[in-house]
């Protein structure tokens, strides 16, 4: 903000172009005041180098400058606009003090506090001026420190009645954004209408361009601005849903192949397993097998809560691929998880299972690569080493990707490209909120495992203040005397790995003195072999208590572990707490999860921990986590690859998304190739939000 203002533009006539977006897809440097020096930080701020990116950078608040009280009745603390006469100037007594202009409106006096002498020239003694800023009271004197605007009365119209305040970054002021936005809005032409007409009428929405102008250069009609904000949010959600629908259609049109088998390998694996699959596993298998039998490539997400039996489902799908004469690969993000899968598959599979990791010897690696190339190894488990160029399959029919959010899209594409028309099954233990089932995962078919396999013990969760540490240690002592194995997860102190590490080492030293020789330590900063050895010692029972950071969150399977202690549980996301808790309760015995927390928790923090105490349902927890933390940080680690929004991050997002889902489905049912007038308008919408080239990304899962 400042005493120089920007105008509220109307659309200008632009050169005729076949592309209605051409004027706003131009670079930011074409805007007034944005040269090469400012273009870089501005592009970083608005999320891209184009004028479109600036237009979609919405204000996060507005300053209302319509309040014009008399000084005698003005209340300090708010923004006021005053018409005052300048009575005198006061020079600072020391260099560190500000300049002052004493002003009056006839009802009272006030001091205009200025930090630069040059601004006094805008307020000559005797002149009547318009000033606007935040009114304060200091030592019984009204003051306006460094006002946002100082204008002659004749130029009062240059000051907006409602002024947007945009998110900023170093080197970019609100005035800079405002001036550039004015130029950007001049380039914004009317776009073809992509919203269904009856919905427009029912919602009383204006056009996209009109709504953007109301939001970026608002007038005094707050209700109209609120309606405009809803319309813009809906546009982004509709673009998302149309893009997802097009991806689904593209997948159905891709040629695939039918993978069928006589079931003999699957029957033998189940015989070795010794239990019948649960009802949920049976249903998921039926869905997967129907996809594999269909003449199109499968892209299915298998979401199973911690301990729900996803690995068995994956193995049976892989054996179906082997029965069909092809190969199957399962890729996991860590060697711990890969080794766990390898042990499980080797024990149950009637056909050879290969192992491929980055830590293998050259000779062992050559042997596995040869077996994959000639087809003598039908099943393989591996880390990211699987998608390296040196890995060639004889005929890859099925690619299974575990904990898929930990792999980049390019990596997932690489594995899918290893075969001819490969089916893809991705798996995650992270419960998916309903919102994300319609967005991030909306282009995939979804199977869910909602029950635990037979023979799993229950988990009892309790809450304890950190002041009760002595009692907790006493309970741990008794559990260890009974032979229990215990995880102790240390708090996330800060973004500093060094500080996290010091917390883990401090707790390890304290517990190791109490239980000498029986405590291990595992954290992300250790050498990989040291960490693997610590986990192996705990798994084998050579240590009873494992102090760890969140490296145990995924893929550590120790059925004998029955106690989980989490320090400063309030610092973790709900989904992450749920993952950690899932490391116990994997055997038949009852297990316990102790959540230690600071005293004096906020109301929201209390609600979160009480929810953890009262339910082990991952789906309930996921929806609550999404609601509390928002879509940007569902896992608590910013690594889940969840969608970020420019316009749709509003309280009414859920209701609007449901409308967008139905509207997109109706459009694509009638016009799957977007050739009708509304379909062509929808194509403009997709390009506006950079959604036009996402088909291959979907195919990677």
Image: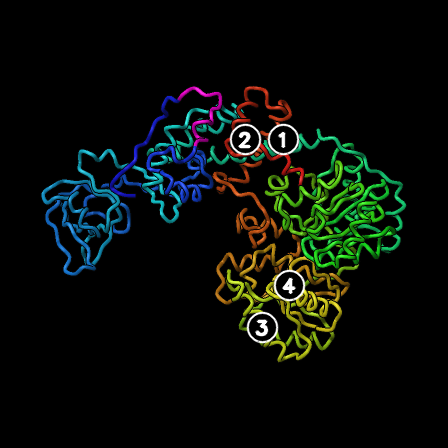
Whether tag 1 and tag 2 are in contact, CB under 8 A, the answer is: yes
Would residue 442 appear left or right of 328 to someone viewing this image? left
State the residue position of label 4.
Answer: 461
Where is mark 2, residue-wise? 686
Mark earlier in primary sequence (4, 3): 4
Q: To which quarter of the image does residue 373 belong?
A: top right
In the rendered structure, which segment of residues is drawn in magenta?
15-26
**SS at mark 2 in the image:** helix
Q: Mark 1 highlights which residue?
A: 246
- Distance between the alpha carbons at the discs numbered 4 and 2: 46 Å
Q: Mark 1 to mark 2: distance in Å?
A: 11 Å
Between the C-alphas of marks 3 and 1, the distance is 52 Å
Between tags 4 and 1, which lies in front?
1
- The answer to whether marks 3 and 2 mark residues whose Cβ atoms lie closer than 8 Å is no
Image coords of residue 404 (percent x, y) = 66, 48
Q: CA distance from mark 3 to mark 2?
A: 52 Å
Residue 181 left/right relative to 658: left
Q: Is residue 24 magenta?
A: yes
Q: If you read the primary sequence from the N terminus, does the residue marked by circle 3 or circle 2 appear first?
A: 3
Residue visible at 14% across and 40% down in the picture: 128
Instruction: Residue at 74%, 44% (x, y): give it.
Output: 399
Residue at 45 percent across and 29 percent down: it is: 208
306 is higher (above) or lower (below) than 242? below
Residue of label 3: 507
Residue 582 in the image: above or below residue 416: below
Q: Is residue 463 visible?
A: no
Q: Quadrant of the C terminus?
A: top right
- Color encoding of the figure: rainbow
């Amino acid at each position: 903000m400042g005493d120089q203002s920007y105008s509220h533009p109307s659309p200008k006539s632009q050169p005729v172009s076949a592309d209605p977006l051409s004027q706003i897809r131009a670079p930011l440097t074409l805007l007034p005041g944005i040269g090469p020096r400012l273009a870089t930080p501005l592009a970083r701020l608005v999320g891209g180098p184009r004028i479109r990116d600036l237009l979609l950078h919405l204000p996060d608040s507005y300053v209302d400058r319509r309040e014009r009280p008399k000084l005698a009745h003005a209340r300090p603390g708010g923004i006021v606009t005053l018409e005052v006469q300048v009575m005198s100037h006061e020079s600072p007594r020391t260099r560190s003090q500000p300049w002052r202009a004493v002003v009056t409106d006839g009802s009272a006096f006030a001091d205009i506090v200025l930090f630069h002498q040059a601004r006094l020239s805008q307020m000559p003694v005797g002149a009547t001026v318009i000033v606007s800023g935040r009114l304060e009271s200091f030592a019984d004197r009204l003051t306006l420190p460094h006002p946002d605007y100082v204008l002659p009365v004749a130029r009062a119209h240059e000051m907006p009645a409602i002024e947007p305040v945009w998110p900023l970054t170093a080197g970019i002021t609100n005035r800079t954004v405002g001036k550039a936005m004015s130029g950007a809005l001049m380039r914004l032409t009317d776009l073809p209408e992509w919203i269904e007409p009856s919905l427009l009428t029912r919602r009383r929405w204006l056009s996209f361009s009109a709504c953007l102008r109301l939001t970026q250069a608002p007038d005094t009609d707050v209700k109209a601005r609120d309606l405009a904000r809803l319309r813009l949010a809906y546009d982004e959600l509709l673009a998302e849903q149309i893009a997802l629908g097009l991806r689904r259609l593209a997948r159905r049109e891709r040629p695939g192949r039918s993978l069928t088998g006589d079931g003999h390998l699957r029957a033998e694996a189940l015989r070795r397993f010794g239990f019948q699959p649960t009802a949920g596993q049976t249903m998921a298998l039926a869905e997967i097998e129907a996809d594999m039998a269909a003449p199109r490539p499968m892209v299915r997400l298998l979401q199973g809560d911690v301990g729900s039996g996803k690995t068995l489902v994956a193995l049976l799908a892989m054996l179906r691929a082997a029965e069909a004469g092809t190969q199957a690969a399962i890729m996991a993000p860590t060697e711990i998880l890969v080794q766990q899968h390898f042990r499980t598959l080797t024990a149950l599979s009637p056909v050879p299972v290969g192992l491929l990791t980055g830590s293998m010897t050259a000779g062992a690696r050559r042997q596995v690569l040869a077996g994959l190339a000639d087809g003598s190894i039908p099943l393989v488990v591996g880390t990211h080493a699987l998608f390296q160029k040196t890995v060639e399959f004889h005929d890859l029919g099925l690619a299974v990707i575990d904990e898929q959010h930990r792999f980049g899209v390019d990596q997932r594409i690489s594995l899918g490209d290893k075969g001819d028309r490969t089916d893809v099954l991705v798996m995650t233990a992270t419960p998916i909120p309903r919102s994300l089932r319609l967005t991030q995962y909306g282009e995939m078919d979804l199977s869910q495992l909602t029950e635990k396999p037979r023979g799993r013990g229950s988990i009892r969760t309790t809450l304890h203040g950190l002041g009760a540490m002595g009692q907790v240690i006493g309970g741990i002592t008794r559990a260890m005397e009974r032979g229990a194995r215990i995880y102790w997860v240390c708090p996330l102190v800060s973004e500093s790995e060094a500080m996290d590490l010091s917390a883990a080492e401090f707790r390890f030293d304290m517990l190791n003195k109490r239980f000498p020789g029986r405590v291990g330590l595992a954290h992300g900063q250790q050498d990989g072999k040291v960490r693997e050895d610590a986990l192996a010692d705990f798994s084998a029972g050579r240590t009873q208590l494992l102090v760890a950071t969140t490296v145990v969150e995924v893929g550590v399977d120790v059925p004998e572990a029955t106690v989980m202690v989490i320090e400063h549980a309030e610092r973790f996301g709900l989904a992450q707490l749920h993952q950690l808790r899932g490391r116990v309760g994997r055997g038949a015995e009852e297990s316990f999860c102790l959540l230690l927390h600071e005293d004096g928790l906020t109301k929201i923090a209390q609600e979160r921990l009480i929810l953890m105490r009262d339910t082990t349902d991952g789906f309930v927890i996921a929806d609550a986590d999404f609601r509390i933390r928002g879509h940007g940080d569902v896992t608590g680690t910013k690594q889940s690859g969840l969608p970020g929004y420019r316009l749709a991050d509003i309280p009414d997002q859920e209701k609007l998304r449901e409308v967008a889902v139905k509207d997109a489905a109706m459009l694509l049912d009638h016009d799957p190739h977007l050739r009708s007038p509304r379909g062509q308008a929808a194509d403009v919408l997709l390009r506006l939000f950079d959604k036009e080239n996402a088909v291959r990304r979907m195919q990677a899962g």
